[in-house]
């Protein structure tokens, strides 16, 4: 992996330690057409906040399943995503946008 990419990832994880930054990042990922982007963003937020073990424990998922669920090939159910967001202190909501 090249040095610039490693520096980017390091800075991203540092920024995602701030809950406001993490929320903006997750919301931006939700805007993408590819739902897998949100899963990867959620995985990055969890990693940045060093909560993978505690989330796995609180959601009764082992860490390997949690990593798998949040991977590019993951296909989690909404009933899995909501408890994960809850462990982070976030919730899922719907809002209307004004382009119609």
Image (tube, rainbow, N blue to C red):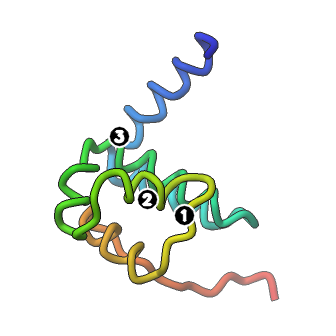
Give the foreground label among 1 and 3.
3
Q: Is residue 11 above or below residue 59?
A: above
Residue displayed at 48% across by 79% down: 77
Labels 1 and 3: the sequence-earlier one: 1
Q: Is residue 32 above or below residue 86?
A: above
The residue under label 1 is 27
The picture places residue 45, in percent across and down from the top left corner, at 40, 49
The picture places residue 3, in percent across and down from the top left corner, at 58, 10
Q: Kindly report the distance in space between the C-alpha atoms of the residues bearing marks 1 and 2.
A: 6 Å
Screen quadrant of the N terminus: top right
- Give SS at disc 3: helix
The picture places residue 34, in percent across and down from the top left corner, at 72, 63
Q: Kindly report the distance in space between the C-alpha atoms of the residues bearing marks 1 and 3.
A: 16 Å
Label count reads: 3
Residue displayed at 41% across by 73% down: 81
**Residue toward you, 19 or 46:** 46
- Residue 92: mark in rendering: none
Q: Residues within 10 Å of mark 3 (few under 14, many from 20)?
A: many
Screen quadrant of the C terminus: bottom right
Labels 2 and 3: the sequence-earlier one: 2
- Give SS at disc 1: helix
- Left-right relation of 51 to 75: left
The picture places residue 46, in percent across and down from the top left corner, at 35, 50
**Residue toward you, 21 or 38:** 38
Cβ atoms at labels 1 and 2 below 8 Å apart:
yes
The residue under label 2 is 23
Q: Residues within 10 Å of mark 2 (few under 14, many from 20)?
A: some
**Residue toward you, 89 or 78:** 78
In which quarter of the view is residue 15 placed?
A: top left
Q: Is residue 46 above or below residue 12?
A: below
The residue under label 3 is 48
Residue displayed at 43% across by 59% down: 23
């Amino acid at each position: 992996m090249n040095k610039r990419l490693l520096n980017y990832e390091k800075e991203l994880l540092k920024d995602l330690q701030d809950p406001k930054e993490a929320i903006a990042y997750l919301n931006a990922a939700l805007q993408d057409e590819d739902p897998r982007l949100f899963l990867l963003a959620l995985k990055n937020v969890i990693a940045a906040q060093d909560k993978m073990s505690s989330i796995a424990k609180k959601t009764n998922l082992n860490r390997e399943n949690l990593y798998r669920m949040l991977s590019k090939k993951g296909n989690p159910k909404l009933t899995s995503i909501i408890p994960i967001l809850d462990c982070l202190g976030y919730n899922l909501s719907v809002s209307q946008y004004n382009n119609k």
